[in-house]
């Protein structure tokens, strides 16, 4: 093999090795960014971009549960929230009468505009909503213990609890 060909082969091998090294560094940066941007539970730490209707922009921070009577987990979460945080708000798209007896101690609000803002997510959803109507934190509930955890975590920020 001539020295020129050998030189070109070595240059191309070096380029390939450098490209692989760059790909490995970029992967590590992506993994580190994911670690930095997540909270202790592994979820994204960025604020949800959900603005509820003007009825929630009254200047007070509150815990809001978005629920539906057709969802057994929603009904269970409502009962748990009414025991743990009386005075919290239940947001629904259904008639308020459907929640009689299920949401004792909760402020039941039927607001189609607010429901539309979150309808792409599956209920039950527990949110901490600030005084401007923005959801500062949002948890898609899968276990009843999450209601207890979130109420304990958010109760210092919320006037209702």
Image (cartoon, rainbow, N blue to C red):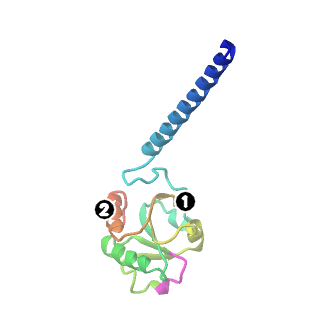
The residues bearing labels 2 and 1 have C-alpha atoms spaced at a distance of: 22 Å
Q: Nearer the viewer, residue 12 or 133?
A: 12
CB within 8 Å, label 2 to label 1: no
Quarter of the figure with the C terminus: bottom left
- Residue that protrudes farthest toward the front in the picture: 1
Relative to 31, say whether 42 is above or below: below
Disc 2 packing (10 Å; few <14; some 14–19; many ≥20): few
Q: Residue 55 appears at what percent x and percent y?
A: 53, 68
Residue drawn where x is 53% and y is 84% of the image: 95
Q: In the rendered view of the protein, which quadrant contains the N terminus?
A: top right
Identify the residue shown where x is 37% and y is 70%. 143
Splitting the image into 4 quarters, where does residue 4 fall? top right
Q: Quadrant of residue 90?
A: bottom left
Give the structural element (helix, strand or loop) at label 2.
Answer: helix
Provide residue 88's location: percent of width, then percent of height: 39, 70
Crowd around label 1: few <14 · some 14–19 · many ≥20 (10 Å):
some
- Say which of 38 and 58 sits in front: 38
Which is nearer the N-term, disc 2 or disc 1? 1
Segment tinted magenta in the rendering: 92-98
Residue 50: give its label: 1
Q: Which residue is mark 2?
A: 152
Is residue 11 inside the magenta stretch?
no
Seen in the picture, residue 62 relative to 32 is either above or below; the reply is below
Q: Position of residue 19 (x, y in %)?
A: 59, 30
Residue at 59% from the left image edge and 74% from the top image edge: 112
State the count of labels: 2
Q: Residue at x 59, y 23 (%)?
A: 14
- Residue in front for this viewpoint, 44 or 75: 44
- Magenta region includes residue 94: yes
Seen in the image, is 142 located left or right of residue 149? Answer: right
What element does badge 1 sit on? loop
């Amino acid at each position: 093999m001539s020295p020129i060909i050998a030189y070109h082969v070595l240059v191309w091998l070096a380029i390939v090795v450098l490209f692989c090294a760059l790909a490995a560094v970029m992967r590590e940066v992506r993994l580190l960014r994911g670690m930095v941007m997540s909270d202790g539970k592994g979820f994204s730490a960025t604020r949800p971009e959900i603005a509820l209707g003007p009825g929630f922009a009254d200047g007070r921070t509150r815990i809001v549960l978005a629920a539906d009577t057709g969802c057994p987990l929603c009904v269970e979460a409502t009962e748990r929230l009414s025991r743990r945080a009386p005075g919290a708000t239940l947001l629904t798209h259904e008639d308020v009468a459907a929640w009689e007896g299920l949401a004792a101690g909760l402020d039941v609000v039927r607001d189609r505009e607010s429901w539309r803002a979150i309808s792409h997510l599956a209920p039950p959803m527990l949110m901490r909503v600030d005084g401007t109507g923005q959801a500062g934190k949002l948890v898609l509930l899968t276990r009843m213990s999450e209601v207890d955890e979130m109420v304990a975590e958010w109760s210092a920020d919320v006037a209702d609890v």
